[in-house]
Image (tube, rainbow, N blue to C red):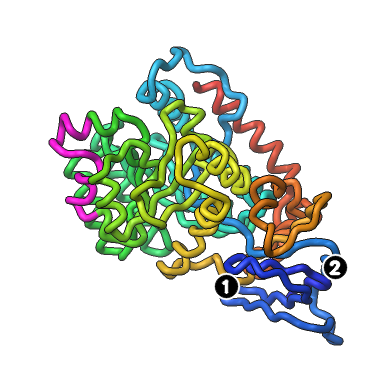
Amino acid sequence: MSILLKNTTYINWETLEFSKTHILVEEGENGKLVFLNEVPKNNPDTIIDCKGKFVTKSFAVGHHHVYSALSRGMPAPKKTPTDFYEILKYIWWNLDKALDKEMIEASALATAIACAKAGTTFVIDHHASPNFIEGSLDIIASAFDSVGVDHLLCYEITDRDGMGKAEKGLYETENYIKTQQGLIGLHAAFTVGDKTMQTAVDLMEKYDSGIHVHVAEDQFDQKYSVENYGKRVVERLNDFGVLDSSKTILGHCLYVDENERKIIKNSKAYVVQNTESNLNNNVGYFNAEGLGNRILLGTDGMHSDMLRSAQAAFFVGQGFDTIDFAAAYQRFRNVHQYVKSNEFKGDGDNNLVVLDYDSPTEMNGTNFLGHFIFGLASKHVKHVISNGKLIVQNGIVQTVNEAEILEFTKEQGKRLWSRL
């Protein structure tokens, strides 16, 4: 099976070089792109005329939370939070405890569809459902596979619900990564004791994986770490060997000091920035200074629109960060380097997005970054190709019945809210 994108303006995602070409897209995990000067006489299985449109590599999410997908419009918490810890306790920990099998499936389907329609074909997710742990990752994987979005999943291991739940999280993690690519998920380090931390690192080393963990999202994380472990969060993680893996992802990193920044920069780990979530939780602002260049962008479950995340990182960063057009785009695309360098599957060259970008001004190789920040939006996503397969055509998901799924997600959303 193959797809021909004819009359395209192709944007090389790495060099930003623009070229007029026809593209033959091969299907499959290792499918290639063949650039042609002329339309082939032997017609491919699918032909899409891309005249006046732009084709480039599809997008990827560096940090997502499937479990929050049904939170939109949910009732207010019974107690109004006064700080970040109470936001976790009365909102997010209350929500994730209420999830069951059907709610997890609905959340995953809703997330995968939203990602696909926004141009994303690869998602790194950090999941939590303390009262439905066993099999939760397989449910999410199956939902993503049905839509056609590749993934790198983990379960958020934590001691906050007791050691029994921590052990179940560890078991779910090992059971999953025996057969599928994945990471070892940890909630913020202040909810992970030394025993659980060491067991998680042992799993990381056993399966040549990485740790995916929230780091210093709020000052509370640092305060707890110093008071209980005599060291700051990144120092503690580093002492356990968490940062020794190039597959490790450190989420947020807002309140890291100069020494911690130096440790991160000199390590193999990646940092993922989640600007809008930080704004929503009123925890502070990301600053990349001293962290190095291995910075990804995520949504932290706020939404599934990576163009929006990149633009938010740029605009908010004008007052708090060292970021310009090029840095915003680089962070947006660094996830591909993370996936490729660590030999994860599902983000090959045959993952593409076709943009119907109706700009009143010309877009070309010299001004693309200006359009990336000030013009491009998810509404411009016309078609999406994942592993050489057309999963979104004319803005409509092709792999599943979106209308039926939305009815299912609404039903599960009501069930979830009734438990909050």
Tell me residue 65's x, y (percent): 49, 42
Q: What stretch is highlighted in magenta?
A: 224-241
Considering the numbered disc 1 on the image, is that residue within a helix, a strand or a loop? loop
Relative placement, left or right, of 47 versus 213 is right
Q: Is residue 172 visible?
A: no
Q: Name the residue under label 2.
A: 49
**Residue 231 in magenta?**
yes
Q: What residue type is labelled 1?
A: Glu
Residue name at image x 31 percent, y 60 percent = 268
Query: What is the CA distance from the residue labelled 1 to the residue labelled 2?
Result: 24 Å
- Depth check: 272 or 363 in front? 363
At label 2, counting other C-alpha atoms closer than 10 Å, the crowd grade (few under 14, some 14-19, many 20 or more) is few
Considering the numbered disc 2 on the image, is that residue within a helix, a strand or a loop? strand
Q: Earlier in the sequence, mark 1 or mark 2?
A: 1
Q: Which amino acid does label 2 sit on?
A: Asp
Residue name at image x 30 percent, y 40 percent = 256
Q: Name the residue under label 1.
A: 29
